[in-house]
Image (cartoon, rainbow, N blue to C red):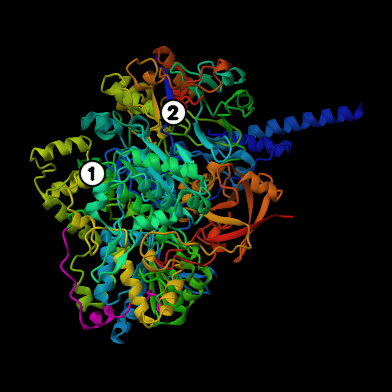
């Protein structure tokens, strides 16, 4: 009897230890990933309101590709060539990249896990969604976003799919 | 927040101790440079496709490479390329593993330790090229350019021309190729007067009888044949396969006829007997276009017996049956089918020619094509014209080169043991060791792995050790390049310019152009460019032979001829054979392009050019023998033998002739020597079983062994992975108490190997077969130490006429491993 | 709703194995250790069955490529405790790796042994995963996987068709095996589309399905001359 009890106690202790460890692990894991910061304090508001740019002008493949893509240096160079067009210190950084012909190392904020198939084309062109549905109103953003407007969670995907009566077949998104 | 379930499981596993997950897969399958990884990770995910030609085997299939942000991720067949029409084989699909292979040589290397020590130091391209050029210049100064050899592999077309040009301008007659198909065509040479491999019209023939030709697995272009084979049902083609072990081709044939190794010729002649006796042969063709069929009288008034008399006198079905082990009823039936079905087609390859009597066997097999009148006929065999390449101006040799080129070719046997070839790996090895007729100072090795593939392994190894400087262009360190002093790695085919044209036996002229679909991953250089650079280093007439700056320009230059000829068209969706013929008949010229640049761009975009329309050949170009006919009685063989007899003292004494013929392993005498006949293979009769090696599709020449997927798939047909097996008939196995999957020793007079037995009804009793391709002692991490190499326990004997290795001439014993 | 199905013409198939290799490359299927492979744990979504029939010398070797049969009445999905495998509305039997708990009930239930299990983590070189086909995720130890009829390609062609505002054409959705078959022995298409080649072939007098009496309604058909 005692032996069984002892085994039971051991099981409980081990389970508790396990749960604690898992909790610690989760916390550590979530903090270990730094929030992305961008090489340039990009101001969406200025570009949209003053320069009159649309989303697709810079994220050129949002309509026809899986990834919307970050603007390549080529895109930036269209406006930011040799002379600065503003007084911003950030623009000088861009010009430096242009002068050195180095691609700007943008960091991705919205990341979809590798077992999920997410296609911009499917949402933008086929589904005719506005960018702001997931990315918020970028007209108001004066600094780079560091947290997704709409968290990339399956809950959010499913909710939206349900509201719009889009398939929730696992295979439609999982691969 | 990101927890992978893997982490989760691992954590839990650590606590309970019940579940310990540890990786057990393969490490380092890929070796991808950091720059590519960066691209793939942060790229936009943009997809692109580009066309090129696969050159992992000589088949020359058109492929489409899918790249994401410029990083190749997948390969599929090119639908518009006429050779494979979208089809692929396992090896070609796996080409990316060759590209990203972790064992590639990434930069030039110099061996710093003993052979096999694995000690290499990297050198810069400049240093490496200087070393080579200085050595070569030095030899020229001493007047010994002929002491430089070049051992190629399966290169054809422009690359072969390029290397020949280099050797010629430099001044050496010693450019040889050692491939598995080396010396296959001597029999064709003897009968038709030229060595061109005929293109069989598998599509239009109604009955196809193959003597050992495993074309679906080991032919020149397996995918091309598979495409043609796939039409057999709607066209009601019947395939008959004659071979000792049922290959993939045999398994797909309508009838498999097992035959004793080394007796294909006798069987073919047995069939010829019936065809002649029952007068089923094409009398018109035989009368007009063959020589030596009937008895004949020569100019001196001497009477000669013809092929007909020989066959009728010697190869009655019972005798053919006794020799070959094929029932005479089967011979009769097959012969009658052949004679009564038109068109019916005969193929010969593989086991039929890989023996000491291979030349005569293939002559006998090919004679059936003549009896059936198959030449230049629908459903028969054709000869394909070379693409109209623009020609380079001739090489202007300087005095040194002229003298060098006039030297006796090195690999020709001194003692006339292989009279009809200028290269046999056996004479090559012997001559290097003996230093005759002159020592070999420098050897270039391009492609291939002769030391692994050959049956004179020890001799060749000794020979390689005697050479001052061996320069290998391999992109991997394999058994042969272990002996190299210097490795100047070539690109992998996806990284380079190249051309694959007129794959032998493919039924139309074609050129596939390879172009880089990815920038070279490592510090490798195109061998064509390296040769140009070495030539320029030497300067003078050698450098002047290469006015173009790169191999790429050379391809472009040569392709101008194709453009200017106005023949054929760039392969494309709409251009199908019937359509082309229709246009041609109406005097249209297809394939019009505004400029060469347009032609070139289309060519690269679509992968290649082809010309499916064959001009009717006149008979003088079909048969280029001295009689202008198909020679049942081979006058060129007669001339060769006469020359040998003269060399050894002349015909005054019958003894001299005997001596020569015995040495050639010819037991026939008189006119019988020069007509197709059966010669006995000198088997060792004290051993009970015939041992034959065979080829499997994923790894036909042993070069694919460092691709993990090909290793895994190596034995998919026998449910074996990464390992060799020996196929044995259950009856034979029971004599030795061998059960399926039992470990056995296979022992020959040369050595023994340990393999697992696979009992099979698809092999003749008393024959055992081991697949070739595994058993590497080098060649990379995935190749090394898996399976056995049957070639290393085969006897070192050859067809004395053609110098082809006799792969099926060894007998063996088998015993259980205790 | 479409009903995707595959037809193998065994009279054309030579058993060359191109489909096996194409599948492995397209779907990032792991290559296991030699010892593991020899122990029967090699992972092939497209497998090749070898059968010898008859006795020497009138022997026949039959080779039969075998993917997942995507049954209309699949036994595997009924035993899955977590709905990681299910029949979707396109008639595909889905396998969602991230739901799978590795109980292997579905493997036991499948009469065709179409499913394989990842006994170990495939260990690729650090970061090398980016050079795999990015359309297919990599699996981890402890999950069951199987032929998906290259469902990821369906996403792609569907998207393209819908961008162009047209219906999917016959032959547009093509799995890697069918795409590369050198003998053109693999047909793939929609059974609901009466004009599709697959529909016509599935009604051929040569057609048969494996273990038809089980009532699982496989959507993989084999064409072969009747020998008996």
Image coordinates of residue A97 in percent, x first then y, are: 29, 49
Split into 4 quadrants, where in the image is the N terminus of chain A? top right
Q: Which of marks 1 and 2 is in front?
A: 2
Work out how far the residue at label 1 is from the one at label 2, CA to CA, in angstroms: 32 Å
Tell me: B70 left or right of B4: left
Residue at the spot 59% in from the left edge and 66% down from the top edge: B750
Q: Which of B235 and B501 is in front in this view?
A: B235
Q: Which residue lies furthest to the right in this view?
A: A1
Image coordinates of residue A16 in percent, x first then y, are: 73, 30
Query: Disc 2 sits on a residue from what chain?
Result: C
Magenta-highlighted residues: B390-415
Q: Can residue B671 be seen in this view?
A: yes
Question: Magenta segment: does it hold B408?
Answer: yes
Q: In this view, does B104 lie above or below B418?
A: above
The residue wearing badge 1 is B605
Residue at the spot 33% in from the left edge and 69% down from the top edge: B638
Query: Disc 1 sits on a residue from what chain?
Result: B
| Predominant secondary structure, magenta span | loop
The residue wearing badge 2 is C8
Image coordinates of residue B514 in percent, x first then y, are: 28, 51
Tell me: A84 left or right of B641: left
| Element under disc 1 | helix
Q: Can residue A151 be seen in this view?
A: no
Packing grade of label 2 (10 A; few <14, some 14-19, many >=20) is: many
Question: Magenta segment: does it hold C16?
Answer: no
Cβ atoms under marks 1 and 2 closer than 8 Å:
no
Image coordinates of residue B695 in percent, x first then y, are: 48, 51
């Amino acid at each position: 009897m005692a032996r069984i009890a002892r085994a039971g106690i051991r099981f409980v202790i081990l389970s508790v230890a396990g749960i604690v460890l898992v909790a610690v692990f989760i916390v550590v894991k979530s903090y270990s990933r730094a929030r992305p910061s961008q090489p340039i304090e990009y101001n969406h508001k200025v570009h949209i309101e003053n320069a009159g740019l649309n989303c697709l002008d810079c994220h050129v493949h949002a309509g026809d590709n899986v990834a919307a893509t970050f603007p390549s240096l080529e895109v930036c160079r269209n406006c930011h060539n040799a002379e600065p067009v503003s007084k911003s210190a950030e623009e000088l950084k861009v010009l430096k990249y242009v002068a050195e012909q180095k691609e700007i190392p943008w960091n991705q904020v919205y990341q979809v896990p590798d077992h999920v198939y997410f296609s911009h084309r499917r949402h933008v062109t086929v589904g005719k969604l506005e960018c702001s549905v997931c990315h918020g109103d970028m007209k108001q953003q004066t600094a780079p976003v560091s947290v997704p407007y709409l968290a990339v969670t399956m809950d959010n995907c499913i909710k939206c799919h349900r509201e719009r009566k889009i398939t929730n077949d696992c295979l439609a998104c999982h691969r | 927040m990101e927890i992978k379930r893997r982490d989760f499981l691992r954590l839990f596993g650590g606590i309970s101790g019940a579940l310990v997950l540890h990786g057990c897969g393969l490490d380092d399958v890929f070796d991808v440079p950091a720059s590519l990884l960066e691209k793939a990770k942060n790229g936009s995910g943009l997809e692109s496709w580009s066309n090129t030609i696969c050159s992992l085997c000589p088949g020359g299939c058109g492929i489409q490479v899918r790249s994401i942000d410029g990083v190749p991720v997948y390969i599929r067949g090119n639908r518009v390329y006429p050779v494979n029409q979208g089809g692929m084989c396992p090896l070609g699909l796996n080409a990316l593993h060759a590209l990203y292979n972790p064992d590639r040589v990434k930069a030039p290397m110099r061996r710093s330790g003993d052979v096999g020590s694995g000690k290499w130091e990297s050198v810069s391209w400049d240093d490496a090229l200087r070393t080579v050029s200085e050595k070569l210049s030095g030899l020229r100064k001493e007047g010994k350019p002929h002491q430089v050899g070049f051992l190629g592999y399966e290169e054809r077309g422009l690359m072969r021309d390029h290397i020949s040009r280099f050797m010629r301008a430099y001044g050496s007659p010693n450019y040889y190729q050692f491939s598995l198909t080396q010396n296959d065509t001597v029999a064709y040479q003897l009968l038709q007067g030229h060595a061109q491999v005929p293109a069989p019209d598998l599509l239009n023939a109604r009955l196809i009888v193959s003597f050992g030709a495993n074309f679906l697995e080991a032919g020149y272009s397996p995918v091309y044949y598979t495409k043609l084979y796939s039409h057999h049902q709607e066209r009601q083609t019947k395939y008959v396969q004659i071979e000792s072990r049922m290959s993939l081709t045999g398994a797909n044939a309508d009838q498999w006829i097992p035959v004793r190794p080394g007796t294909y010729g006798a069987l073919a002649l047995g069939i010829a007997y019936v065809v002649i006796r029952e007068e089923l042969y094409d009398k018109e063709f035989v009368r007009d276009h063959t020589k030596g069929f009937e008895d004949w009288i020569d100019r001196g008034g001497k009477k000669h017996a013809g092929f007909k008399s020989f066959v009728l006198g010697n190869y009655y079905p019972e005798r053919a049956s006794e020799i070959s082990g094929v029932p005479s009823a089967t011979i009769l039936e097959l012969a009658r089918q052949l004679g009564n079905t038109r068109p019916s087609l005969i193929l010969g390859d593989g086991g039929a020619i890989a023996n000491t009597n291979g030349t005569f066997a293939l002559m006998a097999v090919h004679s059936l094509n003549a009896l059936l009148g198959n030449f230049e006929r629908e459903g028969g065999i054709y000869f394909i014209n070379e693409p109209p390449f623009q020609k380079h101006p001739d090489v202007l040799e300087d005095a040194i080169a002229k003298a060098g080129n006039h030297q006796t070719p090195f690999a020709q046997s001194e003692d006339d043991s292989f009279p009809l070839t200028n290269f046999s790996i056996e004479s090559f090895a012997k001559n290097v060791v003996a230093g005759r007729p002159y020592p070999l100072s420098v050897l270039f090795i391009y492609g291939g792995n002769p030391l692994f593939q050959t049956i004179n392994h020890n001799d060749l190894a000794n020979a390689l050790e005697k050479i001052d400087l061996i320069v290998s262009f391999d992109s991997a360190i394999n058994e042969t390049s272990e002996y190299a002093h210097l490795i100047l790695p070539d690109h992998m085919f996806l990284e380079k310019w190249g051309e694959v044209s007129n794959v032998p036996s493919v039924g139309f002229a074609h050129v596939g152009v390879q172009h880089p679909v990815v920038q070279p991953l490592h510090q490798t250089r195109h061998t064509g460019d390296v040769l140009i650079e070495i030539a320029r280093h030497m300067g003078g007439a050698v450098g002047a032979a290469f006015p173009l700056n790169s191999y790429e320009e050379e391809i472009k230059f040569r392709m101008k001829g194709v453009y200017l000829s106005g023949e054929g068209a760039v392969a494309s969706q709409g251009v199908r054979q019937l359509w082309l013929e229709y246009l041609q008949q109406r005097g249209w010229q297809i394939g019009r392009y505004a400029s060469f640049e347009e032609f070139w761009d289309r060519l690269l975009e679509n992968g290649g050019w082809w010309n499916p329309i064959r001009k009717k050949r006149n008979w003088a170009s079909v048969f280029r023998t001295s009689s202008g006919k198909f020679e049942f009685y081979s006058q060129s063989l007669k001339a060769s033998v006469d020359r040998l007899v003269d060399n050894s003292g002349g015909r005054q004494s019958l003894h001299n002739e005997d001596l020569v013929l015995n040495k050639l392993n010819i037991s026939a005498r008189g006119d019988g020597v020069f007509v197709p006949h059966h010669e006995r293979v000198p088997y060792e009769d004290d051993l009970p079983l015939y041992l034959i090696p065979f080829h499997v599709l994923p790894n036909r020449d042993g070069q694919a062994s460092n691709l993990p997927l090909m290793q895994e798939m190596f034995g998919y047909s026998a449910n074996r992975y990464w390992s060799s097996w020996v196929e044995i008939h259950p009856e034979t196995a029971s004599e030795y108490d061998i059960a399926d999957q039992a470990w056995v020793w296979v022992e020959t007079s040369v050595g023994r190997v340990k393999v697992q037995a696979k009992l099979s009804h698809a092999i003749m009793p008393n024959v055992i077969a081991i697949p070739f391709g595994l058993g590497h002692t080098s060649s990379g991490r995935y190749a090394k130490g898996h399976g056995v190499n049957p070639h290393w326990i085969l006897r070192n004997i050859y067809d004395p006429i053609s110098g082809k290795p006799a792969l099926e001439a060894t007998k063996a014993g088998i015993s259980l491993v205790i | 709703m479409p009903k995707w199905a595959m037809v193998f013409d065994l009279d054309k198939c030579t058993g060359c194995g191109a489909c096996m290799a194409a599948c492995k490359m397209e779907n990032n299927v792991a290559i296991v250790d030699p010892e593991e492979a020899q122990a029967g744990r090699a992972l092939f979504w497209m497998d090749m069955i070898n059968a010898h029939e008859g006795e020497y010398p009138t022997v026949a070797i039959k080779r039969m490529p075998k993917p997942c049969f995507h049954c209309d009445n699949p036994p595997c999905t009924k035993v899955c405790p977590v709905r990681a495998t299910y029949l979707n509305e396109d008639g595909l039997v889905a396998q969602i790796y991230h739901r799978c708990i590795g109980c292997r009930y579905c493997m036991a239930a499948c009469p065709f042994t179409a499913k394989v299990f990842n006994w170990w983590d495939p260990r690729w070189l650090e970061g090398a995963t980016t050079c795999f086909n990015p359309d297919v995720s990599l699996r981890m130890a402890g999950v069951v996987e199987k032929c998906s009829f290259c469902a990821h390609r369906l996403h792609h062609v569907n998207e393209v068709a819908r961008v162009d505002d047209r219906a999917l054409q016959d032959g547009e959705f093509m799995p890697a095996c069918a795409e590369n078959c050198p003998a053109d022995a693999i047909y793939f298409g929609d059974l609901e589309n009466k004009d599709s080649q697959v529909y016509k072939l599935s009604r051929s007098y040569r057609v048969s399905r494996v273990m038809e009496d089980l009532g699982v309604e496989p959507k993989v058909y084999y064409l072969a001359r009747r020998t008996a």
